[in-house]
Amino acid sequence: QVQLVESGGGLVQAGGSLRLSCAASGIIFSINAMGWYRQAPGKQRELVATITGGGRTNYADSVKGRFAISRDNAKNTVYLQMNSLKPEDTAVYYCNAEVQVSLTRTQVYWGQGTQVTVSS
């Protein structure tokens, strides 16, 4: 079994910054893509950013230039640096990871979510 544990959420004023972390633990051969998603009240979960095992990144248009995703493969951890935060960034942020759980099988896991609230 694999667990993803997020940390770093909180309350911040508009224009401020937060850094989210998500650490994977358990039986892990390797981790392929990792990513961050968010879900605001009354809205569907949406992609924020992803990063491949080789470090290639992808961002939602709404966060380009403000957010940066990175990972530490030795620690099985993915980060999301969020700068110039806006009230519309308020949401529960979830990390996910595509984990190689055996030589022939991958499985996607999700974290429990961390609340980010940006006040105006």
Image (cartoon, rainbow, N blue to C red):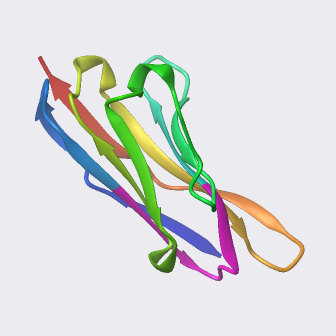
Q: Is residue 14 left or right of residue 51?
A: left
Above or below, comparing residue 12 to residue 86 in the picture: below
Q: Locate residue 53, reporting x and y percent.
A: 63, 62
Q: Residue at x 22, y 28 (%)?
A: 85
Q: Locate residue 106, reporting x and y percent.
A: 79, 65
Q: Which residues are magenta?
A: 21-33
Q: Nearer the viewer, residue 44 or 100?
A: 100
Q: Main secondary structure of the magenta part?
A: strand
Task: Give the quadrant of residue 115.
Answer: top left
Q: Residue at x 49, y 50 (%)?
A: 95
Seen as rendered, the residue at the extreme right is 104
Q: Is residue 85 left or right of residue 44?
A: left
Above or below, comparing residue 21 to residue 16 in the picture: below
Task: Give the quadrant of residue 86.
Answer: top left
Above or below, comparing residue 116 to residue 84 in the picture: below
Q: Nearer the viewer, residue 117 or 16?
A: 16
Q: Is residue 100 left or right of residue 42?
A: right
Q: Locate residue 81, reporting x and y percent.
A: 30, 46
Q: Residue at x 30, y 18 (%)?
A: 88
**How many labels sit on residues?**
0
Q: Is residue 75 visible?
A: yes
Q: Quadrant of the C terminus?
A: top left
Q: Is residue 30 magenta?
A: yes
Q: Nearer the viewer, residue 91 or 84?
A: 84
Q: Is residue 9 visible?
A: no
Task: Give the quadrant of residue 87.
Answer: top left
Q: Locate residue 6, reporting x and y percent.
A: 38, 58
Above or below, comparing residue 120 to residue 35 in the picture: above
